């Protein structure tokens, strides 16, 4: 095995300090393996990082889908923005890809209940950085511009590299609150941050279980603060993405993720499957109605307690640019059928698939009607909160939100 292992730490349910769960090594022949530590296997209350991928057994194990980093571990690693920050701090061009294990160690972890270090005697920090929102906003802007970044701010921004996605963001604490801060980009020609605030807030008003959000203006930039639901009473909750639940890799096979396959996992492995399926169906409908076509498998997740799964609050409900009427969801909500390919952004087609989610057409239609009513009735109020001007409101309504094509029939 390689001489540079990555040690995987975890917070067990209710514990305030992490313990070493095991290590990741790259074999001389190339594959990556994970091995639980003997002390962890013997620990009272130890739970598998995720089953069936990494069951709580002795000996090396590989990822569910091949030779890379186990999917349930990669869920806590950095995506596009995080890798960009890591490269920036190392003085490496953003177009260069480092080894996956290097990215894990450099990120340290942060989302969910996993963290990574290069030493089993060097525990990860259990707290978020102390940088202010202004400082984090300035740091992310400097990274975008390729300008020099003070070391203290570089460290603060590095702390948030495990947050997924490609847009500028960081982790911070505000008293007892643990937050993800998302910032507008200097190259934005679309109100991404404000429209995400509008979508998330309207979703909450419509009765969906979503993360709490707050809109701020920071140093002339828009910022969205998202409450972290993976932190509870000083401990952390383990999370796995829909891709991991489906055994799919984000970069290689993520495009094959579907809502109907996720629904099958929910029926067999989740607590309260009927209520969860209704919530999932409601999120699909809302994504269609607000043009969130970025609803891929990394943007859905569940808590894992070592026995069962529970859907996390919704997050990353972000309307996307839409120049015309035709749109498609990233994940299909139904198998291919005559007249539809299973992911057209049309509520009539979603309603036709209602039985997959243990709903009849009447229940499904009521969910659609209630969401449309909420969007119409709360639109101005929520846009006021986002400080959206009349031009952007007109730009979003009827194009992103309640686009007429969403109500066409096949």
Image (tube, rainbow, N blue to C red):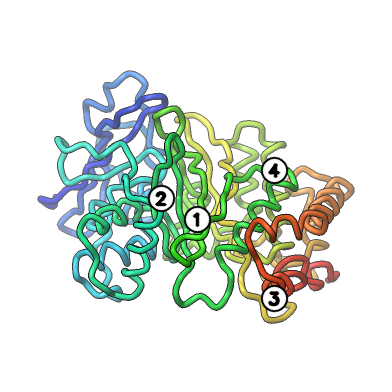
Q: Residues within 10 Å of mark 1 (few under 14, many from 20)?
A: many
Frontmost residue, 154 versus 108: 154
Query: Can residue 51 be seen here?
Result: no
Residue that sits furthest to the left in the current view: 3
Q: Distance between the residues labelled 2 and 3?
A: 38 Å
**Callouts 2 and 1 close, C-beta under 8 Å:** yes
Of the two numbered discs 1 and 4 on the same chain, state the one appearing first in sequence: 4
Q: How far apart are marks 3 and 4 (CA)?
A: 37 Å
Residue that sits furthest to the top in the current view: 44
Residue at left offset 39%, top offset 57%: 134
* Numbered disc 1: secondary structure: helix
Of the two numbered discs 3 and 4 on the same chain, state the one appearing first in sequence: 4
**Callouts 4 and 2 close, C-beta under 8 Å:** no
| Residue at image mark 1 | 298
**Callouts 3 and 4 close, C-beta under 8 Å:** no
In this view, 176 is above or below 118: above
* Numbered disc 3: secondary structure: helix
| Residue at image mark 3 | 391
In this rendering, position of residue 303 left or right of residue 365: left
| Residue 277: mark in rendering | 4
Of the two numbered discs 2 and 3 on the same chain, state the one appearing first in sequence: 2
Q: Distance between the residues labelled 4 and 2?
A: 23 Å
Residue at left offset 63%, top offset 62%: 387
| Residue at image mark 2 | 75
Between disc 3 and disc 4, the foreground one is: 3
Of the two numbered discs 4 and 2 on the same chain, state the one appearing first in sequence: 2
Q: How far apart are marks 2 and 1 (CA)?
A: 8 Å
């Amino acid at each position: 095995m390689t001489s540079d292992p990555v040690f995987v730490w975890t917070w067990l349910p209710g514990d305030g300090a992490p313990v070493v769960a095991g290590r990741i090594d790259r074999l001389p022949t190339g594959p990556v393996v994970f091995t639980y530590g003997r002390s962890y296997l013997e620990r009272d209350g130890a739970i598998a990082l995720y089953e069936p991928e990494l069951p709580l057994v002795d000996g090396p194990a590989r990822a569910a889908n091949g030779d890379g980093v186990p999917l349930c571990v990669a869920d806590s690693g950095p995506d596009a923005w995080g890798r960009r920050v890591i490269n920036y701090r190392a003085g490496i061009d953003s177009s260069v890809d480092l080894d996956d294990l290097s990215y894990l160690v450099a990120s340290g972890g942060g989302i969910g209940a996993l963290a990574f270090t290069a030493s089993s005697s060097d525990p990860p920090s259990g707290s978020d950085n102390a940088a202010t929102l202004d400082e984090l906003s300035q740091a992310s802007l400097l990274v975008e511009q390729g300008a020099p970044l003070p070391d203290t701010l570089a460290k603060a921004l590095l702390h948030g590299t495990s947050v997924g996605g490609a847009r500028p963001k960081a982790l911070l604490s505000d008293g007892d609150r643990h937050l993800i801060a998302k910032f507008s980009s200097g190259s934005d020609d679309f109100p991404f941050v404000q429209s995400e605030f509008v979508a998330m807030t309207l979703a909450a008003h419509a009765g969906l279980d979503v993360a709490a959000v707050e809109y701020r203006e920071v140093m002339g930039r828009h910022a969205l603060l998202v409450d972290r639901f993976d932190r509870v009473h000083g401990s952390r909750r383990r999370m796995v993405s829909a891709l991991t639940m489906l055994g799919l890799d984000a970069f290689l096979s993520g495009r094959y993720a579907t809502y109907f396959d996720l629904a099958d996992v929910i029926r067999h492995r989740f607590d309260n499957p009927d209520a969860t399926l209704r919530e999932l169906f409601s999120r699909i409908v809302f994504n269609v109605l607000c043009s969130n076509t970025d609803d891929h498998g990394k943007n859905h997740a569940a808590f894992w307690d070592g026995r069962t799964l529970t859907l996390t609050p919704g997050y990353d409900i972000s309307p996307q640019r839409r120049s015309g009427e035709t749109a498609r969801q990233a994940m299909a909500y139904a198998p291919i059928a005559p007249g539809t390919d299973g992911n057209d952004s049309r509520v009539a087609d979603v309603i036709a698939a209602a039985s997959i989610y243990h709903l009849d057409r009447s229940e499904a239609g009521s969910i659609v009607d209630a969401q449309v009513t909420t969007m119409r009735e709360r639109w101005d109020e929520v846009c006021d909160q986002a400080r959206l001007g009349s031009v952007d409101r007109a730009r979003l309504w009827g194009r992103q939100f309640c686009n007429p094509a969403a109500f066409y029939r096949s």
